[in-house]
Amino acid sequence: MTDTIIQAEKLTMGFDGTSILEDVSFSVNAGEIFIILGGSGCGKSTLLRHLIGLQEPMSGKIVIDGRELTGADAAQREAILAHIGVAFQGGALFGSMTVLENVALALEEFTTLPTPAVHWIARAKLRLVGLGGYDDHLPSQLSGGQQKRAALARAMAMDPKILFLDEPSAGLDPITAAQLDELIVHLSEILGVTFVIVTHELASVFTLNGRVVMLDKQAKGIIAEGRADALKNDRSNEAAWRFFNRRLK
Amino acid sequence: MTPKKPTRKSDARSLAVASMKIARQPDGICIRFIGRLDHRTSGRCWRKTLRLLDRQMRPIRIDASALESADGSGIALLAYFKEFGRANNVPVEIEHLAAPLAALLERYLEEPDVEAVVPPPALSVVERIGKLTVELVGDVCGQITFLGRLVLAGMKTIFQPQRFRVGDFLRFCELAGANAMGLILMLGFLFGLIMAFSSAMPLRQFGVEIYVADLVALALVRVLGPFITAVIVAGRTGSAFAAEIGTMKINNELDALAVMNLDPAVFLVLPRVGATLLMTPLLAVAVNFAGLVGSGLVILSLGYPLVTYTTHVQKILVGTDVAVGLTKALVFGGMIGAVGCLRGLQTQSGPGAVGIATTRAVVTAIVLLVVLEGIFSVMLYYLEI
Ligand SMILES: Nc1ncnc2c1ncn2[C@@H]1O[C@H](COP(=O)(O)OP(=O)(O)O)[C@@H](O)[C@H]1O
Ligand SMILES: [Mg+2]
């Protein structure tokens, strides 16, 4: 039996009283790569923001690692946040800090490690994502793909149990995107981290080879769930089949 | 990240400890890691390691057989030993490390794919003075060039009036003028009140406090009204222009304009400068009016009837005074709008850039304001207006 690390129950989410997704339920198993797939604007980022507690759902419940996130007080929230790392869609690196300082920030604030150790660990994480040597660059001196990788390194700084990545490979060239996807798979294998990855890139979905939930704007919810290859060949689910096979009709 | 995945309970994790046993042997040093090595527990081990490696050049053997688990930070400690060995030619061996942890260690030790960047050397005082001077001269030249571009753009739109962005212009008029009206009226009123009150005191000693009316009216309409208005417009609107255009620059929107062959001077600057050019004199009129009301209130409170006050004001103020004040306001307004846009267009990259552009817009506008006021005074003196 696998243990569930994230449980979402009947989530309804939206802005200013208008819902974007309704009655969304799913669960994520510890150690798996969980993919949230869907066309642009269907609410993938919104769902992610709810899962990391930046937005409260209109109704429903989220449980992360045995703790309820919805309606949690400050202390409970802190306990949950200590076990998750997030890389945002645009990277969201702190522009006034070097790449190394970005990665080292949380380690400096939350651990008692001596400074040389913090710097060494941060440097190691940067090497892990293929950014060794870029320590003293400012985020503005990095390319888009490098910024995404630096954001991934920052998200991993505290070795969280769950990593949330919003469109990690979007906007990258196929090679860089594939490298990043391979990196994620590799990290998941050697570290046993749970990945929750938002994407709309089909190629990524196949490389990551995780369990997929597919969101849809019209349906305002999940229209398909399963492995990518299964969804690609399942003609009974019209909308999902069209998405996976790039068919308009 | 707990690779071996024993208990995933965090309470168990907080109880966990890691320790390292150092044994000095004839052929080198043997280090045994015991327990769970993660970013919470490895602080002591790190300090021990840093002390040890500070004065140590003998071969190191690390025994990881008693290592229950490790996270990314823990493995980074092992990588640190390896890297130390590589840099100092000391043999470092790690034994009995679980396979996934060894794979992670491998990745940490991969050679970086670029050289580290070297920060540029610091400048000497002389170099810095020279650099600042060159920058200052360049800045003044830039302002003059910009003025030229603006005039050209203005002339272009006179011949092609359909290219003037009327919608934007009206929006900026609202932002710079209508939205500032409340603030302007309040400040003008208080300013008139304060001026009248503080000049009434000394004038009363001579029994001529009614001349407060003449003093305030003349000073306000010719000099202070336009000046106060300009300072407020610089702080409210000039800074907003710089911030808005600066943000556009950071988002590459200016590049987008350039490749669409749209001139930012026409597209962005003219509507803004037009708005401040038109609105500043109007706001100055409002300041004058509110100021006169304020000083009138003081005169009334001194026991004079209203009609005495209005007669004095009417007698002392002639058309040229009003014209002088409004001309100044017009020039100030144009200058503030242009400086705000220029500083916005000059925004550099980086996170603080928009803030710097905004500051520079306000500072430059106020400096130029004083310079222009000086030029006006000299001119008016010689023209005997
Ligand atoms: N702050 C906001 N206020 C109102 N609506 C928003 C906001 N952010 C996003 N939306 C809307 O929510 C929908 C989903 O957005 P998002 O989650 O960002 O989509 P995506 O799946 O591309 O990540 C979109 O239709 C968008 O217009
Ligand atoms: Mg999104």
Image: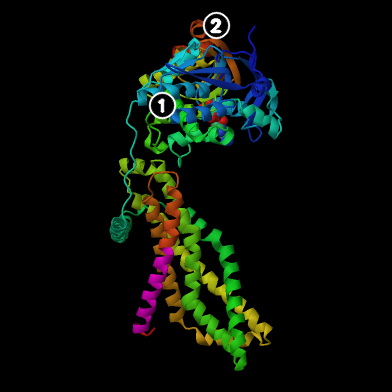
Q: Label 1 marks which chain's residue?
A: A
Q: Quadrant of ligand 1?
A: top right
Above or below, B129 relative to B206? above
Above or below, B130 relative to A220? below
- Position in image of residue B186 (x %, y %): 60, 67
- Of circles 2 and 1, the one toward us is 1
Residue at mark 2 shares a chain with residue at mark 1 = yes
Circle 2 — which element? loop
Residue on which the image places disc 2: A236
**Residue B266: in magenta span:** no
Name the residue at 67% across, 30% down: A77
Compare residues A90 and B230 and report the one nearer the observer. A90
Compare residues A45 and A123 and report the one nearer the observer. A123
- Position in image of residue A7 (x %, y %): 66, 18
How many other residues sit within 10 Å of disc 2, few (<14), some (14-19) or many (≥20)? few
- Decide: marks 2, 1 in contact (CB < 8 A)? no
Type of amino acid under label 1: Gly
B104 with respect to B120 (left or right): right
In the picture, the quarter occupied by the C terminus of chain B is bottom left
Cα gap from disc 2 to disc 1, whole angstroms: 31 Å
How many other residues sit within 10 Å of disc 1, few (<14), some (14-19) or many (≥20)? few
Compare residues B8 and B316 and report the one nearer the observer. B8
Residue on which the image places disc 1: A171
**Residue B374: in magenta span:** yes
